[in-house]
Image (cartoon, grey):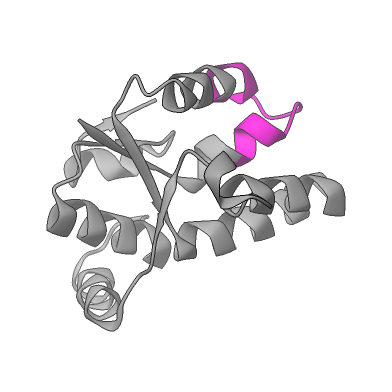
Amino acid sequence: MSLFLDTGIVVAAHNVRDANHARALEVMREVRDGIHGTAYSSDFVLDEAVTLALVRTRSRATALDVGRFFLPERPGEGFVVLLHVDEGTVRRAWESFLRRETPLSFTDWTIVEQVRALRIDRVASFDEGLDAWVSRFS
């Protein structure tokens, strides 16, 4: 079993004012406890999550907490495998972004491409737009 963590889950878990905060905390506990198997995310999601946390909360401390979730001070403390989005994945995501009229962001398309290429079972996300492309739960 495996799971890919999307931006919204991570940011909501760190933002007490987010409407999805409570559910995001539940998902994060499940991930930490290994209920969904190996948990993955990517450097693109890290970038998007730190930026989104800063914009939504206007709190550098919250943005830093989000960053430390992905990049803990001691590598053994983390429970998410951080994947690098390579050039091939970027190019496939770009082609999908160009060809399809959807509300998915470019980062979302990198997620779709990584999940497919690595055969990751599900994506933890609040973004219903992903439903047509990957198996999602929230």
Q: Does the magenta portion include 47?
A: no
* Residue under the point 54% across and 58% down: 46
- How many discs appear? 0
Q: Where is 44 relative to 39, above or below?
A: below
Closest to the observer, 133 or 66: 66
Horizontal side, residue 24 vs residue 2: left or right: right
Q: Which residues are magenta?
A: 11-24
Q: Quadrant of the N terminus?
A: top left
Closest to the observer, 128 or 122: 122
* Residue under the point 66% across and 54% down: 67
Horizontal side, residue 60 vs residue 1: left or right: right
Residue 95 visible (yes or no): yes
Residue 95 drawn at (x, y percent): 20, 77
Q: Where is 134 relative to 82, above or below?
A: above
* Residue under the point 52% across and 35% down: 9
* Residue under the point 44% across and 33% down: 126
Q: Quadrant of the C terminus?
A: top left
Residue 116 drawn at (x, y percent): 15, 54
Residue 103 drawn at (x, y percent): 37, 55
Closest to the observer, 128 or 113: 113
Horizontal side, residue 64 vs residue 47: left or right: right
Residue 59 visible (yes or no): no
Q: Does the magenta portion include 21?
A: yes
